[in-house]
Amino acid sequence: MDVDWGELYRTTLPDLVRFLHRKVWDLERARDLAQDTFVRALRENPANPRAWLFTVAANLARDEARTAIRRKGHLTLLKTEAEVHAVTVDPAAELEQSQREAVVRRALEALSERDREALLLWDGGLDYGEIAGALEISSGSVGTTLARARERLVKAHREQEQDDVAHQ
Amino acid sequence: MSHISKGDVHAYLDGALGAYPEEAARHVREHLDACLMCAQLLEDERRLRQEASAILAASAQGPVEFDPLEELLARAAESDRQDPAEATEGSERTGRARPTLGDRMYSLRWAATIVVSLGAGWMARGLTGPAGDLARGAASERVVSEIGLPPGVPPAADQERSERDNAGDLAEAETLPQSQAAAAGGPADVDTPLELQAAVATGLAEVETSPESPDAAAVGGVGPGADRGAGGFDDDLVLDQIEVVPARQREESAAAEPQVEAARLSDELRASALSSSAPADDRRDGALQLSDAAPGPFATASPSTTPFLVPGLPVRDVRLAPEADGVAGGPSGSVLVRSVLVRSVIVTQELGDGRIIELRFVPLAGSDSVLGGALRERNEFLGRSRQAGWGMAVRDVSGGVAILSGPLTERELEDLLDRALGLR
């Protein structure tokens, strides 16, 4: 099957970065992983590239999470060095975004892995069939999984916000 | 008319009904049009879906710069040259090989082996004891001390338990005839209360009542057909039907009707006692006076004749920790044990105000599994007890650990424990 890689790259990469960002919570790392995933896809030339990209990206993010702990000390050192040279555009906006992101992150962590994965894959643009394939579940249960995931996300997010208010 | 599920509603909202069979998709659409209840559900779920999307959008970052596709193509070509094998053998799980069905089955086989082994170990934990132990179950068998209970009048709880026994829920305790006990090592030669307690717990001791001792008691097996008043033993002794009768009271009973007081604490009574025995707020550390505790007509135990027992307090219950074998128990200065396995001995005594304390000797000579069982049971008990404000005092003693728990301060419990161990 001929794939328009240029079009796929243009349309899919932002979704892939967003998907990965909600897994590694580091935008630069998400961008690198997304591009690495694309490089792999270019080598593999899979039949269903979009679903393939998200599946491989999810696995890379999982591996990333495992190695992150080992790298943590080193990364902390590098980050500190980088921050010295970083140019902060708007500290207040950055802080606000960071706080917002932290609340979402904690809310997502309240979901089961399968529910979270289904929600992020849907948000990444995969259809029910592709989500079912990635999660190895039946297509008929994707709707139920998403319904549960959304409900739990909203509930957990409300609780997180209430906690934050209580601590302020 | 069957309503549609939330999953169907979300599939409808996500425009995913195309993945449904045509008939099913039509049913969802038509039902949503016709059913007010499901139409309401649709609106609720629509709002939920929007809120979830908004939450996810809140974490979205701004635009990100990407390398041009040409650069990625160059990197792909470069990596192909460096590692051609990976390019041909790669899978979707690049970086982590996708497990094949065989791999998964292999993992499952290992998991199944572990599960079966654990299950077999659990089921067979009683096989080391005499035959029939398997049926004993996890329930903690009690060696009930029915102090002064008239012969032949089992309490209602006994009858209930007896019914369970008939149903096979509770196996009879296997007791060794004297000759066999002797062959197995015979009664342990113990002198001190602690040694005796250790021997009791480890099943090495077979100690009979000393009739000469005014504090001694007769321990009678009251299995089916047994003579409860004779003080003898029935080889078919039922664990729950051991009774302990203080010798002094037994003598008095010949002349007068003995005072009757059932010492058995059923689970319900125990729970009730726990819930009502929280320490008083105004109780000062060390304020407990043993003289407060009315000993009652049958409480004549002393450390010199009784292993691990707070002197001056009536005994309410003696039992063995679960997952062990045999028969044990002897408040008031007499113990008979025909046990071949190690287990904890638990004695419940009553304070003067009706609250109870629990003394436990955990033999460390036991196997890990037995010790683990005793500690598990203890922990479960403590978990229930803590809500009632129970504390705990622990002393390392010869052959094991002595534990006293009750609705007292730690200092009071330590004081009582030291008294029980003869350290004060």
Image (cartoon, rainbow, N blue to C red):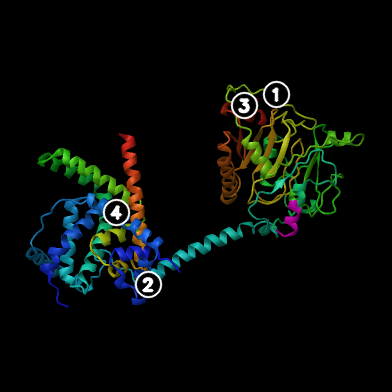
Residue B124 showing in the rendered view = yes
Which quadrant: the N terminus of chain B?
bottom left
Q: Are marks 4 and 1 in contact (CB under 8 Å)?
A: no
Disc 4: which residue: B52
Residue B18 percent across, percent down from the top left: 29, 72
> Dot 3, how many residues are within 10 Å of its Cα: few (below 14), some (14-19), or many (20+)?
some
**B406 shown above or below A28:** above
Which quadrant: the C terminus of chain B?
top right
Disc 3: which residue: B415
Residue beneath the point at 16% across and 70% down: A43
> Dot 4, how many residues are within 10 Å of its Cα: few (below 14), some (14-19), or many (20+)?
many
How far apart, in angstroms, are the residues tagged by discs 1 and 3? 15 Å
The image quarter in which residue A165 lies: top left
**B179 shown above or below A53:** above
Residue B27: mark in rendering: 2
Looking at the image, which is closer to me, A137 or B342? A137
